[in-house]
Image (cartoon, rainbow, N blue to C red):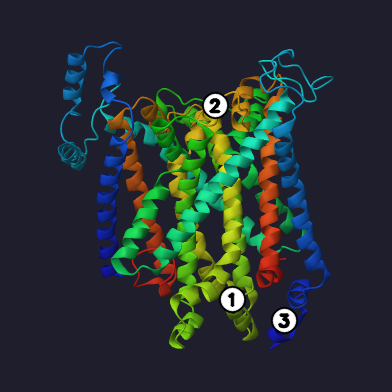
Amino acid sequence: MGRYLLRRFAFLLVSLALASVVLFVLLRMLPGDPANALTSVGASPEQIAAARHSIGSDRPLPEQFTHWIGQVATGDLGTSFVSSLPVGPEVGSRLNVTVPLTLAAFVLAVLIAVPAGFVAAYKRHTWYGALLSGASQLGIAVPVFWLGMILVAVFALNAGWLPAGGFPPDGWNQPGEAVRSLVLPVVTIALVMSASLIRYVRSATLDVLGSDYLRTARALGSSFGRAMWRHGLRNASVPVVSVLGIELASTLLGAVVVESVYALPGLGSMLATGIAQHDYPVIQGVLFVSTLAVLLIGFAADLVQRIIDPRLRGRLSGGAP
Amino acid sequence: MTQIVRTPHEGPRAASAKRPGRSAVSRRSVTLITGCVLSGMILLLALVSLFWTPYAPDDTSGGRLTGPGAGHLLGTDKLGRDLFTQLMTGSRIAVEAGLGSVLIAAVAGVTLGVLAAFAQGWLDDTLSAFLDILIAFPTLLLAMLIVAARSATLGSAVLAIGLAQSAVVARVVRILVKRVLAQDYITAARTSGTSWPRIVAGHVLPNIWPTLVVNLALQFGLAVLAEAGLSYLGLGAPPPNASWGRMLQEAQATFTTAPAGALAPGVLLVLLVIGVNLVADGLRDTLDPATGRRRS
């Protein structure tokens, strides 16, 4: 396992390096001159050239890239073209919203989906088993922003229990307000996320319930609970963990729509603004941080899968040997 | 010993698993028929909208935000456009978005996934890393980049959604194929001299097919949802094409005063996605009787 950890970590670094190059090149292929964002309409060619020089976009690409990587290595994500503020601290303050939002929604979704998915499979011939499956069918089909709109209309506009949107200007210095403003977004994401998770948990459980090894264990005299605990849980959790990793990673930035519904200053909305303004340092910084997060989550998911399923050991990444 | 005696009396579950009787068959067809009716309804709306709508899509002659009633089946929006007309053109955009994206995702995803599953060593690792990085770009953000590079059209949205989904499909396919390749019957087939293409056609694809169909149908639903999300953010099909997502965004401010506009597009979206998912479930049970019996 120690050697595997080392190899997997080296792999993580290589992926990150590759991703940085791809990211950098892709962003330079976007149309629109960032110098336009710095100068007023009708600026003279000299002014535009000066603007280009000031942000370094007149230098050759490899030089720009090494400059950027050098900065990132020292923890400096660059300076926004538009606001002239450093990107790093801004990303940090956005993460203060996005990370609690994502993690809380993720934990809530798992807490809902794992028991619900198991019951939906094990008790599929009862009315409540069928109801759970139906509810997850419905949940998958509901657009996340529409659910948000409805929750706002019911719980904020009608009942007035929770704020309809926004985040306190002082952030976590007003913990009560901050938590209150995150309740509806967290519930919105968690409900939608758990709907699809229930399906995966249900199908993994069904695979186990129909498996030969479970029947053998039962035939050898093991109780159902013991057989599920010793054989079922392990086997069912391997595919679920891999789905969990993907879900967590895609929620991190995919929360942009929910952030838009609730007017939250998160990472997703920062990126959306950055793209609209052709603000390279912002786009680059946000995407770099999120790529790093996604790779780390994949690293963790691979590790967990290997601890659960010894058959996977010996492979670097992914599902089966 | 008591355990063994008790097992046959496990109840209807064990019994129905052994005997795919009437209940399993009728349940399968109920799922399939419900799915076909739901998605067929939306498809019909989309097809009819090609030839006829109650009003012209840009006809603003109705009063603003009138409720459901005479002249306008579901009322009008804030510009006085007929809501039902908007819903019909919206259904066409939703179906187009779903079909286009899934087509791109299926072709690119399955090819990439099978290749990645067969790759060994560093090539496998590189391909997985590539897929991980692609997945690291959430659909919506990839779409934003593409929309920024091109322009806000339905084509940009479909291209972005399809590309993002092809990474997800490829990853699923890769894991599925790898799992099949690890089975003893593959080793047996290899040992007996069967060639890889024959193994893929004879063992791998039939084994991953049911899961793949379900996954692609889910992707159709997700594509419809993603297009609605993009339109909600103003990055989908430009006006006067009424996408359900943009209709919802426009109706958000008047949710409490004119709920029809904020509810109807969402309801149709949900019906379409549920319908397609049910069709997929019904198909899976038909295509793969083994899992069908077990899962019914």
Q: How far across and how far down the image is residue B55, in percent?
A: 74, 22
Name the kind of residue labelled 3 in the image.
Thr
Residue at mark 2 to residue at mark 3: CA–CA distance: 61 Å
Say which residue label 2 marks. Answer: B238
From the viewer's perspective, is B90 left or right of B152? Answer: right
Badge 1: residue crowd in 10 Å (few <14, some 14–19, many ≥20): some
From the viewer's perspective, is A184 left or right of A59? Answer: right
From the viewer's perspective, is B32 left or right of A222? Answer: right
Q: How many marks?
A: 3
Does residue A315 lie above or below B140 as drawn? Answer: below
Name the kind of residue labelled 1 in the image.
Ala
Say which residue label 3 marks. Answer: B7
Contact check, label 2 and label 3, Cβ < 8 Å: no
Chain name for mark 3: B
Query: At numbered mark 2, what does the secondary structure look like: helix, strand or loop?
Result: loop
Residue under the image location 79 percent in, 57 percent down: B30
Determine if residue A244 is in view.
Answer: no
Q: In the figure, residue B249 lies in which quadrant?
A: top right
Q: Which mark is residue A227?
A: 1
Query: At numbered mark 1, what does the secondary structure look like: helix, strand or loop?
Result: helix
Does residue A208 lie above or below A252 as drawn? Answer: below
Q: How far across and how far down the image is residue A94, in percent?
A: 38, 32
Query: At numbered mark 3, what does the secondary structure look like: helix, strand or loop?
Result: helix
